[in-house]
Image: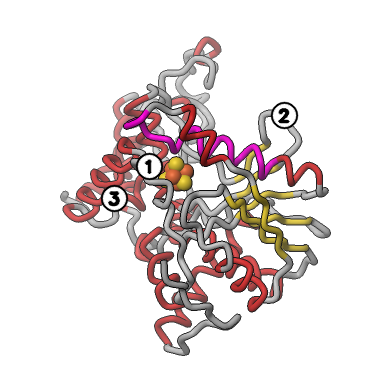
Amino acid sequence: MSSPSIPSAEPSTASANFKRLQARLRGLVGKAIADFAMIEPGDRVMVCLSGGKDSYTLLDLLISQQRAAPVDFELVAVNLDQKQPGFPEHVLPEYLKALGVPFQILEQDTYSVVKRVVPEGRTQCGLCSRLRRGALYRYAREHDIDKIALGHHRDDIVETLFLNLFHAGRLKAMAPKLLSEDGRNVVIRPLCYVPEREIVRYARARAFPIIPCTLCGSQPNLQRKAIARMLAEWEKTSPGRIDSIFHALRHVQVSQLVDPKAFDFASLVRTVPGDVAPIRGGAGAAEGDGDGGEDGAGDRAASDPAMASGSEADEAAADDARAEAAIRGFTPLEDWRERATLSPD
Ligand code: SF4
């Protein structure tokens, strides 16, 4: 394959559009780091670099965080050369040297293992990813790495939610920060608030020397592809839907789900009229208890400013709560009536 171009350390475009995009992505990454306490002073952060758009973008944005952040932390970029046929070994070392970031290229022939173990025609990505993760985590343990940074973004998180929902019967997605099973590695996902479409724009503008993940000849994960297609279709017909789903992941109300392990339904007791906590901000499981807290719109703005004014869902939920409470005689009906008059929809 021909050698991809090696960009300079600075963005290749000085356009105002790119600068706005860059500032926005820096802001989202900074917010994610702060919200989830991803990086602490003195941390050694290992950035897993695959050669794809996501990990290049992650490295770029962490370098700018490192320059601007009030805390000192170290960065080391690590790539695992899995010995796929045609893997352009020179690309990442040349790119990383030009960038001036410390790096390490590991070598392990996981390609042969996957080919030997996985039957022809079956997807190899599951085993391939596990082997890659094993090698990277081992490196982190042996080199005193505090945090392992991965390039998963907002859309990966939403896709994982639906993969678990549709194929595993679980309500779970992908954590922005987690402890590995053996408790010896902390994994962080600083791109967790960043929509994939913005990473695509950023990577194009920066002209990263992308190395395709298809050198192995494997079928991609078909279920994930199908979910991504479904979400893209939804987004086309109902723009903002992915933002809304992601917003929901940040505002979980376990009292409105059906898991007795997650919420203590057994302890719920009837309340006596006149002795009732306010509906807004209440911690209980009052039916229709909507998320009317002030942080709703602001948090959506974190994933996309376009969502900053979209508080209709919150208002509708709050209306439901008022209606329910009014029916039970707990709050004056006038408050709800007034809103109903103002918002006939
Ligand atoms: S496409 Fe190939 S290299 Fe990429 S995860 Fe799947 S098996 Fe591994």
**Segment tinted magenta in the rendering:** 120-137
Given contact means CB atoms under 8 Å apart, are the residues at marks 2 and 3 in contact?
no
Q: x, y percentage for residue 114?
A: 49, 34
Which-is-in-front pick, marks 1 and 2?
Answer: 1
Q: Which of the 4 quarters of the picture holds residue 9? A: bottom right
Indicate the secondary structure of the residue bearing disc 2.
loop
Residue 200, percent from left and from top: 39, 66
SS for callout 1: loop
Residue on which disc 1 sits: 218
- Sequence-wise, the earlier of marks 1 and 3 is 1
Instruction: Tell me: 220 left or right of 88.
Output: left
Q: Is label 1's Cβ within 8 Å of ligand 1?
A: yes
- What is the spatial separation of the Cα atoms under label 1 and label 2, in whole angstroms? 30 Å
Of the two numbered discs 1 and 2 on the same chain, state the one appearing first in sequence. 2
Which quadrant does the N terminus fall into?
bottom left
Residue 58 lies in quadrant: bottom right
